Amino acid sequence: MWLLVQRRIQSRSVLRKKHIVQDATCQVCNASEETPDHIIGGCAIAVSFWKRLNLNSMVGIQHQNLPSVTPSPGILVDEFPAFLALACWEIWKLRNAKVFRQENVSAVQLLSRCKSAAQLWSHGFSAKKRHIPQSWCSYFQMARNLLL
């Protein structure tokens, strides 16, 4: 998450500045320059994902505004930064799956991956706070079942 906030994740725009690639176009949507902000909040799959989660403030987000995002109704306030970190990490992994393995993943599949990750993360929470990632699982499942 620190690399994302610092705009240092290895997006195509960063790689172009380092003269590693010549084209900075997003390989997931092919619609825009792949900047850290685009990956997390501007790419079509990320936009669909955030809308399903009712986190419209994440659509088109600028990296410097990440700390000010607040949870939508249904997402616990406790550990919300961890919820966002989990979601951003899964978006990043989806991007890498597309770029490096040519996998196509939908927003619905991304929500399933987030639910699985939240289940794993629950083991890292104290017994007193284990209900938090379990509530995330329910929220990801609810968003996955939405018809858009």
Image: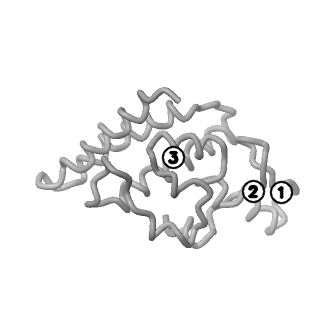
Q: Secondary structure at mark 3?
A: helix
Whether label 1 touches label 2, CB < 8 Å: yes
| Residue appearing at x 26%, y 60% in the figure | 78
Residue labelled with disc 3: 50
Residue 8: image x %, image y %? 63, 68
15 sits left or right of 6 in the view = right
- For label 1, count other residues whose C-alpha is less than 10 Å away and answer few (under 14), some (14-19) or many (20+): few
Residue labelled with disc 2: 12
Question: In the picture, residue 99 is in which quadrant?
Answer: top right
Marker disc for residue 21: 1
Residue 88: image x %, image y %? 50, 53
Identify residue type, mark 2: Arg
Mark 1 vs 2, N-terminal side: 2
95 sits left or right of 91 in the view = right
Identify residue type, mark 1: Val
Residue 19: image x %, image y %? 84, 65
Q: CA distance from mark 3 to mark 1?
A: 29 Å
Q: Nearer the viewer, residue 57 or 31?
A: 57
